[in-house]
Amino acid sequence: MHDEFDKASEKYDDFDEVVRAEDVPFTPHVRDALLLVENPAEVAYKLGKNKSELERISKLHPLDQAREVNKLSFSLMGGNNGKPSTTKPNPMGTVRANPANSTGAITDKTPASVIRARMKAGTWK
């Protein structure tokens, strides 16, 4: 994580003041949660820039702190900054009332005599 923080300090001029300063209220649980996300430097910087949000998170239960760090990580990776996605999933194909039957399939129109004959031959499925 130190390597990522060093890279981030090159990216952001104020990274060390925002994240590594002594007065930044990162709890041990938030620090632990940063070890589990793919973009810990970005999350730490975002939280360090928004101290009121960091203080709100630090008052939560430890598991909730980890959940909040994880949610922030995902939103930063997705580029939507925590906003819900507006893209709609593609609809599934329509279900036809009479799907195309494979040749020889048994339907409700198949006569009982044909079903009996196929059952005796072992090919009734």
Image: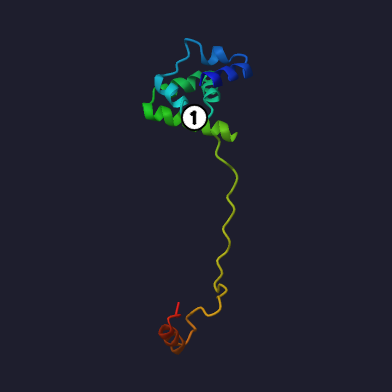
Where is residue 90? Give x, y as percent: 59, 53
Disc 1 packing (10 Å; few <14; some 14–19; many ≥20) = some
Q: Which quadrant of the structure image shows residue 31?
A: top left
Q: Residue furthest top?
A: 22
**What residue would you read off at disc 1?**
37
Residue for point 59% across, 48% down: 88
Q: Is residue 11 rendered to the left or right of residue 20?
A: right
Q: Residue furthest front?
A: 121
* Relative to 56, residue 103 above or below: below
* Relative to 98, residue 56 above or below: above
Where is residue 3? Give x, y as percent: 55, 19
Q: Which quadrant of the structure image shows residue 63?
A: top left
Residue for point 41% across, 83% down: 119
Front one among 75 and 5:
5
Residue for point 41% across, 85% down: 120
Way the structure is coloured: rainbow
Q: Secondary structure at mark 1?
A: loop
Amino acid of disc 1:
Val
Where is residue 79? Give x, y as percent: 60, 34
Q: Residue furthest left?
A: 61
